[in-house]
Amino acid sequence: MPVPGHLNFYIDPGRCIGCNACVLACTECDSHKGQSMIQLDYIDRSASPQTVPVICMHCDQPTCAEVCPADAIKRTPDGVVQTARKPHCVACNNCVLACPFGVPKMHTAANLMMKCDMCYDRSSVGLKPMCASVCPSQALFFGAADEIAAARPHSRAIDAFQFGRQSITTKVKIMVPADFEPDALDVTAALAGPSADLIMDNLCDEGEGQ
Amino acid sequence: MSAPRRRFGLHQRTIIINGILALIVLIVILQLWLLTATMSAYLGGNTVVVWPAALASLACLGLNVGLLVYLFRLER
Amino acid sequence: MSDPVSDQITRPPDGRAPEEQPRWRQDFPIDQHVEQYVTRREFTKFMVLTSVAFVVGQFWIAAQSLLRRKESAPGLEIARLADLPVGGSLIFDYPEPGQACILVRTGEREAVAFSQLCTHLSCPVIAQADQGRFHCPCHNGNFDLATGQPLSGPPRRPLPRVRLEIRGEHVYAVAMEGMAV
């Protein structure tokens, strides 16, 4: 059964209180085999307690699947990018290195890449994923678009990202302030200072040189 | 072939290909049986069935190729 | 009514149309349902190849049977009628040395010959012309003397027959006949 089309995942980093409930709830999901696939990142720990939960964004152009040499990462018709298929995965770590969001995790003991699959056993029958069901501040929200629009009138959902020259659109949406102008979130531009730009330029030049 | 061909969606085509595959697998199993039975009879000295069996196997191949051609036509 | 474009939910990173994508992208799609379709299609093609192989095998057997009929074993003199009384039997190798056959003179100018190997477990059969049968002592099997058909005991298939020709005083074996079913 596919995930119902009207239900979607929304991440609202501004509401995250860093309680780690999602990280622990993730291990409870039946399809995760006791592994947590959520990473709770500190934005700038010395300056702020602000945290942000990182779950799979389920890209429309999944870089992890693009780089997989073993054809192990597949996307179901509902748009969910699944964990690597065990018989195919060669534990090469390509996806872990390639994902712009840093989502896939190598489960070394099982030689298998595991990643957030939106708790497919739950979401495919219309239930909320584990993390969204426990999040006390609803920074992780799973529901219909009109629900979240009514609940958070000062935010809007965005699903386009820019990583250097790579544009990505995703199934999972991020809540940004309603007055946020650009259509796409330029992640690399938000990284610290001109040195990041320099690195990106060098990387792009190298890529073109080949 | 002047009539406009109906286009099927991927979901429908998956169902059709499952049907084709089931038929082809059945026919191939029949051919396998035919080959082993013919080989057994031939090695036992009975050459009467050899040519009818070969023609029957050819007919099975004809069916299979027909189904495959239908599959190719489906995708165009 | 849907076109291949909407069949794919995953978009290639270069953003070009699916038709403009390289071939490998069609063969290794990221979408699970497309991949399922592709692998089944490939497997179907493979099964038709297998079918071709079976037909080749069948015709190979048929060709072999034609060849074998043409290369039937040459005539071989096995006995002189004068040396063999009516009802007497003789063992000879035909068509190759070591393949024992048994000849029985059934009449003044009549004789029959069969492979000596019982069709049950290949014990040598002995002729019992007075009782009109070949007898296999291993498991008490019996074959008809005139036709080689099994009469009693474990054997179910007839003895392979050797075609004979009597030219003057000499008996020639000219061919092995296939077993009649």
Image (cartoon, coloured by chain):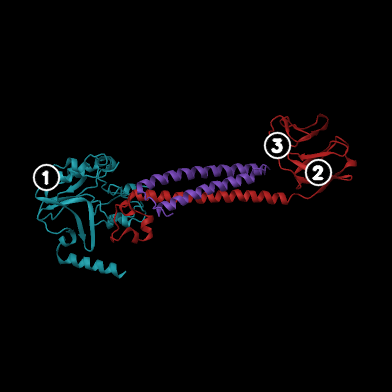
Residue at x 48% of width, y 45% of height = B24
Inspect the image, locate mark 2, and give the three-letter code of the amino acid beneath it. Leu
Q: Colour of chain B?
A: purple
Q: Are marks 1 and 2 in contact (CB under 8 Å)?
A: no
Left/right placement of residue C64 relative to residue A91 reads right
Q: Which quadrant of the view contains residue A120?
A: top left
Q: Colour of chain A?
A: cyan
Q: Residue under circle 3?
A: C119
Q: Which quadrant of the view contains residue A193?
A: bottom left
Horizontal and vertical percent for residue C33? 34, 48
Can you see residue A101?
Answer: no
The red chain is: C
Inspect the image, locate mark 1, and give the three-letter code of the amino acid beneath it. Ala
Left/right placement of residue A97 relative to residue B4 reads left
Residue C164 circle label: 2
Is C153 placed above or below C4 here?
A: above
Q: Residue under circle 1?
A: A150
Is B33 placed above or below C39 here?
A: above
Q: Chain of mark 3?
A: C
- Distance of mark 2 from mark 3, alpha carbons? 21 Å
The residue mark sitting in front, 1 or 3, is: 1
Q: Residue furthest bottom?
A: A209
Are there few (<14), some (14-19), or many (20+) residues within 10 Å of tag 3?
Answer: many
